[in-house]
């Protein structure tokens, strides 16, 4: 399965080069949150952070070389995301973030922030750092799942340092 971070037997992904091989190094763990560096065969590198449990994941990947960031969710039950037409999430009681053009594959639903969206990315990162929960919403605004942000602050700081040092 495609995902962004490996935890034991789970692989946690998301780049435009999914089919490419890469080396992964977990550089930090705090509870269910993990941070990793990927080095792809073609030479680019990404940093990723995420909340990872056996049956669900929330993930962020940042590739400064190729100027994109990815936010998304993965579930072991692939039917959860396969039925969605949009991706919506919120942090605590903040306004929801959404896209009507997500990518859906292998149990994952995610969207790209291009470099021009840096302000939005910064706001989401700040909300994650100060938040308690991330909520994943269905197309009809029903709660799909919630993710605890305990461990997110330190993980996001490590992610930001990772991106700066790549």
Image: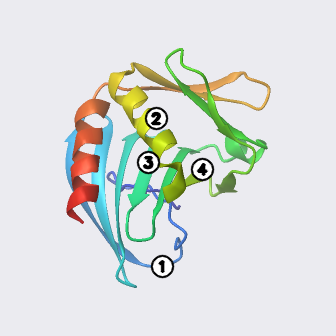
Give whichever of discs 4 and 2 has the lower sequence position. Answer: 4
Mark 4: few, some, or many residues within 10 Å (few <14, many ≥20)?
Answer: many
Give whichever of discs 1 and 4 has the lower sequence position. Answer: 1
Question: Disc 2 or disc 3, which is closer to the eye?
Answer: 2
Q: Nearer the viewer, residue 123 or 20?
A: 123
Residue 95 rendering spot, x and y as whole percentages: 60, 22
In space, the residues marked 4 and 2 are separated at their CA atoms by 15 Å
Question: Disc 1 or disc 4, which is closer to the eye?
Answer: 4
In space, the residues marked 1 and 4 are separated at their CA atoms by 18 Å
Mark 1: few, some, or many residues within 10 Å (few <14, many ≥20)?
Answer: few
**Is residue 46 positioned above or below 21 on the image?**
above
Give whichever of discs 3 and 1 has the lower sequence position. Answer: 1
Residue 6 placement: quadrant = bottom left
Give whichever of discs 2 and 1 has the lower sequence position. Answer: 1
Q: In the visual, does 53 lie left or right of 18?
A: left
Residue 159 rendering spot, x and y as whole percentages: 28, 48
Q: Secondary structure at mark 2?
A: helix
Q: Report the residue marked by disc 1.
A: 20
Q: Report the residue marked by disc 4.
A: 110
Q: Which mark is residue 60?
A: 3
Mark 2: few, some, or many residues within 10 Å (few <14, many ≥20)?
Answer: some
Give the position of the C terminus as an image quadrant: bottom left
**Is residue 103 positioned above or below 119 on the image?**
below
Residue 5 placement: quadrant = bottom left
Going by the picture, which residue comes out furthest to the top? 93
Question: Disc 4 or disc 2, which is closer to the eye?
Answer: 2
Residue 117 rendering spot, x and y as whole percentages: 53, 49
Q: Report the residue marked by disc 2.
A: 124
């Amino acid at each position: 399965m495609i995902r962004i971070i490996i935890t034991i037997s789970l692989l946690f992904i998301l780049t435009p080069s999914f089919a490419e091989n890469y080396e992964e190094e977990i550089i930090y763990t705090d509870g269910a949150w993990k941070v990793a560096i990927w080095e792809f065969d073609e030479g680019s590198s990404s940093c990723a952070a995420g909340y990872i449990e056996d049956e669900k994941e929330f993930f962020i990947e940042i590739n400064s070389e190729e100027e994109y960031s990815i936010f998304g969710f993965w579930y072991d039950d692939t039917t959860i995301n396969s039925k969605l037409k949009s991706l919506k999430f919120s942090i605590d009681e903040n306004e929801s973030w959404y896209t009507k053009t997500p990518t859906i594959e292998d149990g994952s639903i995610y969207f790209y922030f291009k470099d021009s969206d840096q302000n939005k990315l910064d706001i989401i990162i700040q909300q994650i750092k100060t938040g308690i929960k991330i909520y994943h919403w269905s197309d009809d605004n029903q709660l799909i799942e919630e993710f605890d942000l305990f461990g997110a602050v330190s993980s996001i700081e490590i992610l930001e340092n990772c991106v700066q040092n790549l």
